[in-house]
Image (cartoon, rainbow, N blue to C red):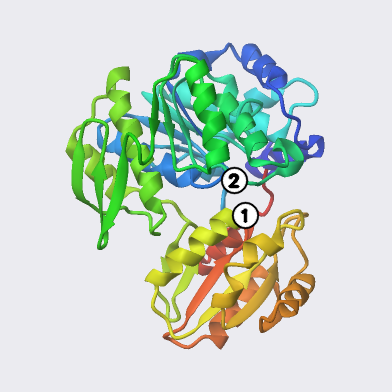
Amino acid sequence: MTYEETLAHIYALRRFGIRPGLDRVSSLLARLGNLHASLRIIHVAGTNGKGSTAAFLSSILAAGGYRTGLFTSPHLISFTERFRINGAEIGRDEVLRLAQRVMAAAPEGTTFFELVTALALLHFAGEGVDVAILEAGMGGGHDATNVAAGILTIITPVALDHGEWLGETVPAIAREKGGIIKAGRPVVLAEQLPEAAEVLVQRSKALGCRLCRFDTDFTARWHGERLAYRGLHRSLEGVRPGIGGRYQRVNAACALAAAELLATEGFPLTDEALRRGIADARWPGRMELFPGPPPVLLDGAHNPAGAGALAEALADFPRRRLILVTGIMGDKDAEGILSPLLPLADEVVTVTPAVERGLAADRLAAFCRERGAAAIDGGAVPQGLELARQRAGSDDLVLVTGSLFTVGEARAALLAAPYEPFRG
């Protein structure tokens, strides 16, 4: 098989849909020799901020001299983005080699995400990483990443999302997300809604975990463009995050608290490693600015909580006008996502992401116009982005958001890079 044929086979597993549970992935890994059992795993679960938090912590560990694996999803442009070691993506030849092994061992009915998780664990074990950070998919307890035993868990803010799978209330979603917490292992808990915090605190206590909570045991505050971190045992002044957005203070603080806790797990880190790791962290498609003119800001906010944080962060971006380019999945809460953003937009260009679940641009434009926005149908993402750039003045800001799929397509267009549209 070629690389392209292999990816086509892997993507075809999406026909099995989302099937929560660990039996299939456990069986698959057993057939592969349970090589992942030797890995030191850090789990990152939650609704918003998982990727940024994982990227911050991965950068800190790499700055400290540790060989660090990072598994995230979905990718923005290329499948290889999902698997990184010290920031470097897996090579295509390695994907091809490992995928052949994993596909040959996969039980009938193995899902896309289960196979990709197994591929990540096999890659990290084969490369002998010191530690591997796994971003959970949409869940926690029943997420394929939970097949691996962890040494530490980070739970980022929990909010309503994926209700058809995780539950229709915040406590129900928190119970599923919290299922990834391991008995006796430390837990870093980000800022949470009270009803989510109650569930997660109770589970941590019931399992005898050391619990470290944002704004109780550690915190971070902005002083101009830099953060002041007050941690479990350390304080750091003048920390400048490499990932943009005011809301990153919580994600950066959680990564720093986790780094402090890792000293007891055999990963001591200096203050310089903490500072440099936060500063060197990058997370494409999240408050990522392309200078222009006109400047284009990419952010993957795809639920109401993420959109609200984005709306607040826009205060740091001076502009004459804001032109919003948005494409949303048909099964997402369009009202909740766009409500914080439409009042800030002078013009709206709607687009259709190149995935099956993408909401048609003409329907989204009508939706926006019904809410008083000056919206036009921009068609496909690259065409809509180009239209917005043409309509923008040099001192206007073009914002692309609504879905990571939309952002990925836009980013590929801005970089003139090949785009792999099929995701999981």
Residue 188 or 24: which is nearer the viewer? 188
Identify the residue shown where x is 36% and y is 41%.
215
Badges 2 and 1: C-beta atoms under 8 Å apart? yes
Quadrant of the image occupied by residue 253:
top left
**Quarter containing the C terminus:** top right
Q: CA distance from mark 2 to mark 1?
A: 9 Å
Label 1 Cα neighbours within 10 Å, binned few <14 / some 14-19 / many ≥20: many
Q: Amino acid at mark 2?
A: Ala
Identify the residue shown where x is 56% and y is 25%.
180
- State the residue position of label 2: 159
Relative to residue 387, is residue 83 depicted above or below?
above
Dot 2 or dot 1, earlier in sequence: 2
Residue 281 or 100: which is nearer the viewer? 281
Identify the residue shown where x is 61% and y is 37%.
137
Q: Position of residue 335 (x, y in %)?
A: 70, 64
Quadrant of the image occupied by residue 64:
top left
Relative to residue 225, is residue 102 depicted above or below?
above
Q: Position of residue 25 (x, y in %)?
A: 67, 21
Label 2 Cα neighbours within 10 Å, binned few <14 / some 14-19 / many ≥20: many
Whether residue 88 is visible to the viewer of this picture, yes or no, is no
Quadrant of the image occupied by residue 171:
top right
Q: Amino acid at mark 1?
A: Asn
**Quarter containing the N terminus:** top right
Relative to residue 138, is residue 348 depicted above or below?
below
Q: Position of residue 388 (x, y in %)?
A: 58, 80
Question: The residue tagged with tag 1: helix, strand or loop?
Answer: loop
- State the residue position of label 1: 303
Whether residue 312 is visible to the viewer of this picture, yes or no, is yes
Q: Position of residue 252 (x, y in %)?
A: 35, 45
